[in-house]
Amino acid sequence: MKVLLLGAGHIGQTIARLLQGSGDYQVTVVDRSERALQALGVPGVKTQVVQTEDRAQLATVMKGQDVVVNALPYHLAIPSAHTALECGCHYFDLTEDVAATKEIMRISEGAKTAFMPQCGLAPGFIGIVAHHLAKGFDTLHDVKMRVGALPAFPTNALKYNLTWSVDGLINEYCHPCEAIHDGRTISALPLEGLEHFSLDGVEYEAFNTSGGLGTLCETLDGRVKNLDYKTVRYPGHRDLMMFLLGDLQLKSDQEALKSIMRRSMPTTMQDVVLVFVTVSGMKNGSLVQEVFARKIFAEREGQAISAIQITTAAGICAAVDLFREGKLPQKGFIRQEQVSLPDFLANRFGKAYQQSRQVESIG
């Protein structure tokens, strides 16, 4: 299967390595940065410098490809998906942007090819887990989804290092958050809904951020009383972000905030991804709660790979692989919750989650 991978950043590098290394995919990677393409170092992968904001250039490289895998910043999701539709390619991406997902859902109506956005960690794997647990209940009360990509050794006041896209990070802190409260779909404010919890003796905080629910609000509408998604950080992070975005009014000058963070906040390959889902409701006449909680750590042996690289790349590679195997719809819009959790965890790429340390797991 011919795959065109858009983006040669940290996540793109890992995607290319996984897909090309499997032997079932012929991968071509395009990026506007020649340096990023030269850094790939994946045997057998073709590369080409392309201005990824230019739809005409994208169309040229998409023609003849079977699948487009988009690992570009979220604001390029809509033009990339439109171009894939025009070129007759199946389309997969990692976007957490709600508006982009709704537009991709719209253009996929009646399409002869498949469109599957939100294939990363959150949205992505977290929705697959939540839906799998929810299916086992007669009546659903609460579905709580919590995810954090955190530095293993925080040292600054924010207790945070850059582990993924700054654009995506700020985007999810600034846009309204979908949720279901008392059976009704609502729009919640980002950075609100602060809560604290501990896991393995470590204290965490969690708060509203946008995009993590994917399409679960629509899928579980009318079936669940309360449904929400929150990002996990170390205590104190949220208050400082509210100061930056609100008090200093950097929400209205996001480029300045991104520039500050890129300049002053180091990236790290030593991170940990926390996945924590709780579902409660009625089963056989009893009120029951089920929990899925795991930690995925960076790989330090051989080539260093961060936990966020592992989890994000595994999510989208597993989606493409399950699609190739015919275990997903072959046209139209595909929701993350249409993925079977057992199929995902049994997949050669999805096993990255299975091999993680299970804090508390379902059978």
Image (tube, rainbow, N blue to C red):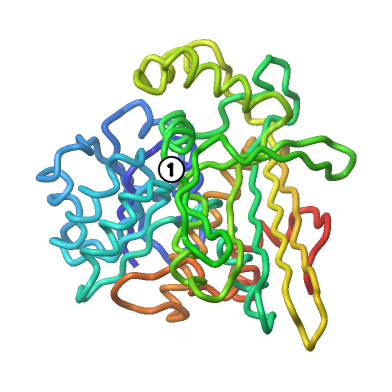
Residue 359: percent from the left, percent from the top? Answer: 83, 55
Question: Which of the 4 image quadrants contains residue 239?
Answer: top right
Q: Answer left or right for 138 relative to 106.
A: right
Location of the C terminus by quadrant is: bottom right
How many numbered marks does the figure carry? 1
Looking at numbered disc 1 in the image, what kind of residue is underneath it?
Pro
In depth, the one of 45 and 79 nearer the eye is: 79
Query: Which residue is outermost to the left?
Result: 56
- Position of the N terminus, as image quadrant, is bottom left
The residue under the point 79% across, 42% down is 197
Apparent side of residue 196 relative to residue 79 in the rendered image (left or right): right
Binning the other alpha carbons within 10 Å of mark 1 as few (below 14), some (14 to 19) or many (20 upward) gives some
Across and down, in percent, residue 87 comes to 15, 61
Q: Residue 235 in the image: state x and y as whole percent.
A: 73, 28
- Observer-nearest of 250 and 225: 225
To which residue does mark 1 refer? Answer: 176
- Taking the view exactly as shown, the residue that stands out farthest to the bottom is 284
User: Which of the 4 quarters of the picture holds residue 102?
Assistant: bottom left
Is 19 left or right of 200, judged from the image as shown?
A: left
**Residue 339 or 23: which is nearer the viewer?**
339
190 lies above or below 92: above
